[in-house]
């Protein structure tokens, strides 16, 4: 059985480094992996991608040839990728691995929210098992009310891609120990965000209601602190992915 792990998150949240480090960690556990770079604008990667959209579309070339700015060029590049879906699928057919790790562009709003990004992704995934890992950057969660807004972004990305999703806080080596403790205890007790927002003395009704909805729907159920620098949280992340791919059973 093959599983796609699609890394999505705001610019600079750590997707590329996670593709590198989590991929190496999976290999150290004797799983075979392939890394797929879906970012046509990236200049340098810490890993060598097995499948790379830059073989077909380069945002830098699109920028100069079509005289576009960086964002316009990225939009055009992702639209152009639709014309190369068969090339990407042919590249993909050369691999048969346990996990495909998909690294997506930084401007997630262009990738996850416009139609072309999900179309390219859907074509690649086909009927294979797939899970999204949404990376919340630690700079967005300095207090419970900002965690609500970060999770609403995660929820919004989920509503576009509609794949089982694991939410993580990346760069956990930068988090204070008490925030890690809150994230880990909150996950055991099944989401306490509404309570935390009230304790923060934020009585805004929309904020409180949103926090409650995130709690009730289980969206705050588990937010895993993960670090690509120290591999902290990799086992928990893997466990959550396993639950999605194989109902909690170890992969063969
Ligand atoms: N401290 C720390 N820094 C990290 C970690 N992961 C990534 N970084 C740093 O965060 C910055 C962005 O990392 P990337 O992996 O390029 O993030 P990205 O989400 O792929 O970025 P875009 O593709 O541009 O959106 C880099 O300077 C990394 O060194 C981590 O676990 N801990
Ligand atoms: Mg990246």
Image (tube, rainbow, N blue to C red):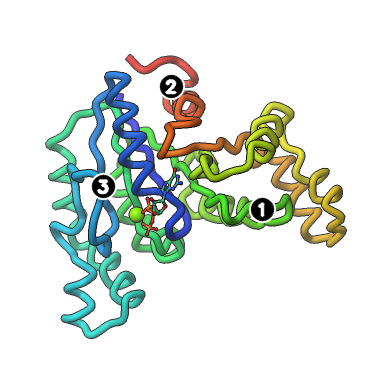
Q: Quadrant of the N terminus?
A: top left
Q: Decide if residue 197 is on the left or right side of residue 25.
A: right
Q: Mark 2 Cα within 10 Å, few/some/many (few <14, many 20+)?
A: some
Mark 2 lies on residue: 246
Q: Which residue is mark 1?
A: 142
Q: Which mark is residue 46?
A: 3
**Label 3 residue near ligand 1, CB within 8 Å:** yes
What residue lies at 29% left-to-right and 22% top-to-bottom? 28
Q: Nearer the viewer, residue 224 or 221?
A: 224
First-in-chain label (3 vs 1): 3
Going from N to C along the chain, the mark reached first, 1 or 2, is: 1
Q: Are marks 3 and 2 in contact (CB under 8 Å)?
A: no
56 lies above or below 45:
below
In front: label 1 or label 2: 1
Q: Is residue 183 left or right of residue 169?
A: right
Residue drawn at the location 57% of the way across and 55% of the way down:
139
Q: Which residue is nearer to you in this view: 146 or 174?
A: 174
Point 71% across, 52% down: residue:
143
Residue drawn 16% across the image and 34% down it: 95
| Residue sticking out furthest to the bottom | 67
In the rendered image, the quadrant that contains the C terminus is: top left
Callout 1 secondary element: loop
Q: For numbered disc 3, what is the local secondary structure?
A: loop
Q: Position of residue 11 (x, y in %)?
A: 44, 60
Residue 213 in picture, x, y percent from top left? 74, 47
Q: Nearer the viewer, residue 239 or 162?
A: 239
């Amino acid at each position: 059985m093959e599983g796609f792990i699609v890394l999505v998150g705001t610019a600079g949240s750590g997707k590329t480094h996670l593709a590198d480090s989590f991929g190496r960690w999976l290999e150290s556990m004797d799983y075979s992996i392939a890394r797929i770079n879906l970012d046509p604008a990236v200049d340098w990667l810490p890993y060598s991608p097995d499948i790379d959209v830059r073989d077909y579309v380069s945002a830098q070339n699109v920028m100069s040839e079509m005289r576009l700015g960086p964002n316009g060029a990225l939009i055009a590049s992702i639209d152009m990728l639709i014309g190369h879906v068969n090339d990407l699928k042919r590249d993909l057919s050369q691999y048969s691995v346990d996990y495909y790790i998909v690294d997506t562009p930084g401007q997630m709003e262009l990738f996850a929210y416009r139609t072309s990004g999900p179309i390219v992704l859907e074509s690649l995934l086909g009927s294979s098992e797939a899970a999204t890992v949404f990376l919340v950057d630690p700079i967005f969660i300095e207090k419970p009310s900002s965690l609500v807004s970060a999770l609403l972004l995660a929820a919004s990305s989920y509503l576009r891609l509609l794949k089982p999703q694991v939410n993580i806080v990346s760069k956990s080596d930068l988090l204070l120990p008490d925030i890690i403790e809150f994230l880990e205890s909150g996950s055991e007790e099944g989401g306490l965000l509404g309570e935390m927002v009230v304790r923060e003395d934020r009585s805004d009704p929309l904020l409180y209601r949103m926090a409650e909805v995130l709690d009730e729907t289980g969206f705050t159920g588990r937010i895993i602190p993960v670090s690509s620098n120290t591999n902290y949280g990799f086992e928990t992340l893997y466990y959550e992915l396993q639950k999605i791919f194989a109902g909690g059973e170890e992969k063969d």
